[in-house]
Amino acid sequence: MRDYYEILGVERGCDGASLKSAFRKLAMEHHPDRNGGCEDAAARFKEINEAYSVLSDPQKRVAYDRFGHAGVNGGGGGAGPGGGQFHDVHDIFNEVFGDVFGDMFGQGGRARRGGPARGQDLRYDLEITLEQAFAGAEVEIVVPAAMTCETCEGTGAKPGTSPTVCGTCGGAGRIRASQGFFSVERSCPRCGGTGRLVLDPCVDCHGHGQVRKERKLQVRIPAGVDDGARIRLAGEGDAGARGGPRGDLYIFISVAPHDLFERDGLDLLCTVPVPMAIAVLGGEIEAPCLMGGENCDGNCKIPVQVPEGAQTGKTLRLKGRGMPSLRSRERGDLVVEIFVETPTKLSARQKELMAEFAELCGEQQHPKSSTFIGKAKRFWEEVTGGC
């Protein structure tokens, strides 16, 4: 699919006014009714409307900038995060051009806003631990959402009464008026385009047909989920109006920083201090791991064999001890970086032994130091001319 900014011919950082201006110009140029029903013009017009429906919605635009077309669930007519601002092409056109062009471009006689309307999509930002991302988890969240009023069953009218048909528009939700050569259709100002009036409103929802309540939901976090992932819960958004379907709930995942581990794709990285004696002689140490899953308290350990002569910065890779993949049975590795600890508080006897050890060490025990000293000596000989 083409880039939405490219379709409208605007820069990514453009403001709303520039966006609307570009859309107006392109929509007027490519509207099918102005191009004799040309199929190419119709396809181009649809593409323009789709791009504008996403980029004109602040939340959808953020999602598109971050995730591309996948972030808005396929684009303008769908239900991406924070969606629901525009329901179809005609809504977009009215939003930009106003009702004056309604009948000119073939929108006359459409009572679009009075019928069932899909509920708004909702966004919920959820922070989880690395342990939860590693093992998967069930998390309970509390989401405020619009619910159909139980008292009036969504009608907005006081129990025992019903909404009445709007006398101004006759229930159509739109009215016609003549402006010059044009017969103009616009939303009914009395009923707001619903075609009905609530004369005796419900005391609980105040005539809206919906109330906002907190809902508890169980969210399943799949093992291997990464920072920035999105989980869609279909039908868990706001309730629809006038019998319309519920919107969706989008869970945006962030993984909290961990005290011991960093994540690199499917690999887990950690630094482990190693006593100098083990670094010199080789031996076994214990490294932290997440194999205990969500209930691991950081004390889960795994044995690691350190080769003799290990230096600070050396890495040891433990196959299959990293993060699980979301899309396969593959697992990453646990990469342990060694940090050799130098003893700081020595007894007299320990110092004596270290001094004896230093005397016994030759160039073979310190090849890098010997190489460095040799290079330094040659450098000074060149500088001083051997004096």
Image (cartoon, rainbow, N blue to C red):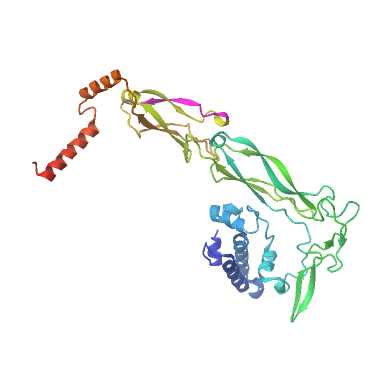
For residue 119, side relative to residue 279 (left or right): right
- Which residue is at the front of the view, 116 or 373? 373
- Determine if residue 187 is in view: yes
The correct choice, above or below, for 208 with respect to 28 in the image is above
Q: Is residue 303 magenta?
A: yes
State the quadrant of the C terminus.
top left
Residue sitting at the far bottom: 180
Q: On screen, 288 above or below 208?
A: above
Return the x and y of residue 171 as percentages of the image width and height. 84, 64
| Residue 235 in view here | no
Q: Give the quadrant of residue 39.
A: bottom right
Give 376 or 320, whichever is nearer the viewer.
376
* Segment tinted magenta in the rendering: 295-308
Residue 115 picture location, percent across and down: 78, 59
Q: Is residue 17 magenta?
A: no
Q: Residue at x 24, y 23 (%)?
A: 355
Residue under the image location 54 percent in, 64 percent down: 14
Vertical position of residue 156 compared to residue 39: above or below: above
